[in-house]
Image (cartoon, rainbow, N blue to C red):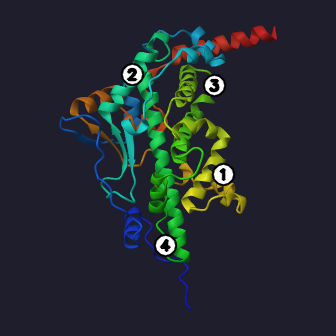
Amino acid sequence: MTFTVHPKIPGDFSSLLDWLQSNNLCFNAQDTPQSETKKETLYTFPIPTLSQGQLDDIPKHKITDNISIKQLLRIKKDSKPIIKQLHWPVVPTDAVACYNPFHSHSDEKWGIYFFADNLLSHHQQLYEASKDFLIWDYQTLLHLFVFEVFNHEFFHHIVECTATYIEILQGAAQTPFPVYFDYKIRQQNGIDHPHHPLEEALANAYAYNAFGFISRQKAGYKTATVKLYQAAIRKHWLDAPKGYCAAENYIYGKHNLGAACLLEQLLNSPNACHRSPLPAITQHLMPSGYTTLFTKPKIPTYVIGTQAAITELQRHLPALNATYSQLFWAKETTEIDRGIQRAEQHHTQSING
């Protein structure tokens, strides 16, 4: 028997889709997501990726809210007094965005979709409920909201990629099994888990954790507003539907054990963690944003809605791809950041005498 050292096997995404299709691992679904309530003509707009030069050319706007340095420092130290008074309406993520899996949608239709009209409408409700506290201005809150929603949906891509890798490994060893389709059917019928649907709880927690790279930075306007937003969504989870409301159990390091339970569900092997060290897989391999077929800036993402809503969204978020993938915002915060740093230094010096 002769083995090829470097087999010429196509590794591109189109070939993967062909393999899934030829092995009956795909299933049919509605190709175009539908936004709620709108009877006007809806447009689908693919979101472009801007270069660093294009991002640098976007004019930076000064902060338009009236929040003071003293208030930002107070929020950084203890956000509970504001959060206690903050009452946000429940915003179902599925009402403002969705993820179309590539297992069930064509190459041109799969990906993440924002529903522009609903997104702006729900954001307006959040803003009206919080504007009296002088925490975020309209655009700042919109940036944070879009970043959260996108990362929630991106987690669904992470889950599908994980299922796909299991299907590929099974196909290499024996006959491929429709892992993703079987999981989705069981999920729809109700999987026996106290936090079902677990995937939604983990998606909320993943979106929360995605803010971590900013909240761990030195004190500044962005850091303070992000930390406060994280505190707000943790309170908001308490009123969320089943599954979504359980995200608190999976934030930070607790996400790993939840992901191990999700692997059990994908494998349809209850209590597999008692027989096999699945947490070793979830901690070092998958499900993870580092092992997806597409990174956050590259995953196909669209805005669907009326022309007026799409235009309004683009006006407030001129770099939408950079906003949802890295929380870019065109705001000039240098002056207030320096003020916060000076106040922090002065506070430290006063403590040290």
Which residue in the protein does label 4 denote? 176
Sequence-wise, which precedes: disc 2 or disc 1?
Answer: 2
Q: Picture coordinates of residue 198 (x, y %)?
A: 55, 46
Q: What element carries label 3?
A: loop
Measure the alpha-carbon separation of dots 3 and 4: 49 Å
Q: Is mark 1 on a helix, strand or loop?
A: helix
Camera-nearest residue between 321 and 131: 131
Query: Picture coordinates of residue 153 (x, y %)?
Result: 45, 43
In the rendered image of this protein, does residue 86 appear above or below residue 276?
above
Can you tell which of label 2 and label 1 is closer to the viewer? Answer: 2
Sequence-first tag of 3 and 4: 4
Rendered residue at 62%/12% (across/down): 74
* Residue type at numbered disc 4: Pro
Return the residue at label 2: 125
Q: Are marks 1 and 4 in contact (CB under 8 Å)?
A: no
Q: Which of the two labelled residues, at mark 1 and mark 3, occupies the earlier sequence position?
A: 3
Q: Which residue is drawn at 46% across and 76% down?
A: 8
Inter-mark Cα distance, 1 to 4: 25 Å
At label 2, the amino acid type is: Gln
Q: Do the residues labelled 1 and 3 touch (CB within 8 Å)?
A: no
Q: Where is residue 299 in the image (x, y as percent from the top left)?
A: 41, 49
